[in-house]
Amino acid sequence: MITHPCFAVEPWSLRETELSLDVLAQSESVFALSNGHIGWRGNLDEGEPHGLPGSYLNGVHERHPLPYAEAGYGYPESGQTMINVTDGKIIRLLVDDHPFDLRYGRLVAHERVLDFRSGILSRTARWTSPGGRTVRIASQRLVSFTQRAVAAVVYEIEPVDGPATVALQSELVANEQLPRFEGDPRVAAATESPLVPEEHFAQDTRLRLVHCTERSRLRVGAAADHLIDGPESVRWTAQSEPDVSRLTVTADLVPGQPLRLVKFVAYGWSGERSLPAVHDQVDGAVAGAMGTGWNGLVAAQRSYLDRFWAGADVEVEGDAQIQQAVRFALFHVLQAAARGENRAIPAKGLTGTGYDGHSFWDTESYVLPVLTFTAPETVSSALRWRHRTLPQARERARQLGLSGAVFPWRTIDGPECSAYWPAGTAAFHINADIAMAVVRYVAVTGDEEFERGEGLDLLVDTARLWRTLGHHDAEGVFHIDGVTGPDEYSAITRDNLYTNLMAQQNFLAAADAAARHPDRSAELGVDDEETAAWRDAAARMAVPYNETLGVHEQSDGFTTLQRWDFEATPPENYPLLLHYPYFDLYRKQVVKQADLMLAMMECPHAFTDEQKARNFAYYEALTVRDSSLSASCQAVLAAQTGHLRLAYAYLAEAALMDLDDLEHNTRDGLHIASLAGTWIALVGGFGGMRRRIGGDGEPELLAFAPRLPEALSKVAFTVLVRGRRLRVDIGPSHARYRLLEGEPLVVLDHGEPVTVTADATVERRIPPTPMLPEPQQPPGRRPLGVLVGDAERDGPATHD
């Protein structure tokens, strides 16, 4: 989309300079506003035209039965789908009785700007009605970071070339008509008119609707109040019915005399609280917003984002698109989590209904690493949500005959919602992903209270799962059989390397945490015998390796499988899962997304530099990137192994996943994990940042190995670690480290310890990049961010 002529490349904003209906649905996703609790898609203020109307509350969903040709023991019985809740964005406009609809009359000018520093979506337009009257429209919209339940809109209308009678209809609308759903009819039934009316109200300038979902029994309330500023002729009426509550404001205007409406909207929901309680909750929240006022909300929003950017900004010189993309990415990652407060972070955030609004493993493996170093308070909240679902995860483990907890592959509020075993619920690695998110958060923040409480619970239950899921063979080697790793083109394998290495870290982290908190461990029934068993399993963990090829195996026996016939696969047959049976994919050497590469990124201590280089070259030739999660990981490994130009190409693919709609599904919502991957590619790839885990009494250190590709002249970033703000500036030949805040910090630069203080900048020379032959990708699968010269030589890359 950013290459579409109606979008501009700017460092701190996303600007649409004219309205293009052919990318309207995609623009609604990229212009979405959220605070992790409320999500408003970037629909036009007037409601129509639209691609996908969307107003969401984190956790509000409806249940539906899961279909099976044959029932089986342990199959999840019901699914969950995020629903469109009451829409509070709508302010319809009539000019001399003509509805303001951009498909009629003449749109003279139209511009929208999403400002990453203010968190405000602004819009200006000039429109000539079918009756010939030209008007100027301006609006601003925000979803508040500081008042969790509140969103607000300012809407202004003024005639330009003569007097006009205008009407504004500010509405709360439930059960909006949505585009026809083409998928599972059970899901369609759950999302069509999912809200059952319980209360409607309209009086003076105040509106309210309360509904309840039919199956999940979640009560949803929305309230609105308004400030009206206009000429003496202005008047208004309010009315309501079960699914619509409306304030109609009319006025006779002349040029130079605008009508201004400020709309404050508040949301609340609960699965337990009564109708009067939810009613009072939203009324109180909207009253608080009215008291703060629009200017107060704007000032608080800017202050919140100033604090965020002070600890999160990434500066890029040499590529204006990447600079815009990384700030766009960070803004949306923050929006997905900021005020989630013990709720999940969905894979699409609250920007659309893709993946039914479910949360997956990529929250812990992609999103939380970024937030840990930039907005750590959001990470403890996300992990507390996982902790809240522990009872369901324990019950799932018992159902499968296992100990500990089995966390769901996909869910909204805890139960497993995946109806597909091989490439879904068999991916037990999500347990270790959660455990490592706990370890990372505690290591970076020093939050011992969290580790002693929720963190230890999560570490213990995940470790117990691995101990019963795996087994020691006759020679004492610990194997984990019948699982699926991150690569969903290989399923039900033995000893998936990523799973084994992550489980190994899980075992050791749980044992170490139990030793640090013996009283809490005793409460959980952990004794010395159990922790010894964990350490023994970790020490004897199977690590598949092909001695002949000199590479690690993605899973036991993977390198002996027949290679996929890439040369005979036409470009239009990607993604493969839409054109070939899983039976064929599972028995061939073909990789959907980074798997063993992800193991090398997450567990770098388990591989030598030479092994990383050989592994990367081998698996690069097999990886087709039929997943948006792959490019950022490949960028990191390409940078680590010295292939900086290739890393830059993968960075561009991750960064532009939604801005260029590379997967052709941005209309369904943003790829939050791929957006997070933009930061990972820059900071973990070109910054070379990773945690070096201490051993034998050594402390854990933050390590850097910075190197830039020729295309970039500078990358600078700030990370938060143990109460400090550390800034890293990387140029072509030198890296500079400086503490912006906090006590002195020891870090590693290319393996050498460096003490960084607030008094002076430490400068280090960047060693030469090793020269290695550039690995090849499957034919036609070069990264989408490939450099122009490479594209001319190799032909265009394709991706779906």
Image (spheres, helix red, strand yellow):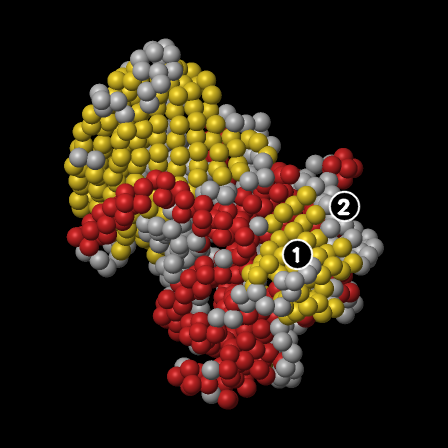
* Residue 621 in view, yes or no: no
Residue 477 point in image, percent of width and height: 63, 80
Amino acid at dot 2: Glu
> Which residue does the image show at 74% across and 36% down from the upper left?
788
Horizontal side of 632 relative to 187 (left or right) equals: right
Residue 67 point in image, percent of width and height: 38, 52
**Pointer 1: residues within 10 angstroms few (<14), some, or many (20+)?**
many
- Disc number for residue 710: 2
Which quadrant of the figure has residue 484?
bottom right
Mark 1 or mark 2: whose residue is earlier in sequence = 2
Q: Give the camera-side residue of 101 and 619.
A: 101
Q: Give the camera-side residue of 132 and 738.
A: 738
The outermost residue toward the front is 759
> Which residue does the image show at 70% across and 41% down from the upper left?
318
Residue 85 point in image, percent of width and height: 31, 44
Quarter of the image for the C terminus: give it.
top right
Horizontal side of 500 relative to 142 (left or right) equals: right
Residue at the spot of label 1: 728
Q: Is residue 414 above or below residue 701?
A: above
Amino acid at dot 1: Val
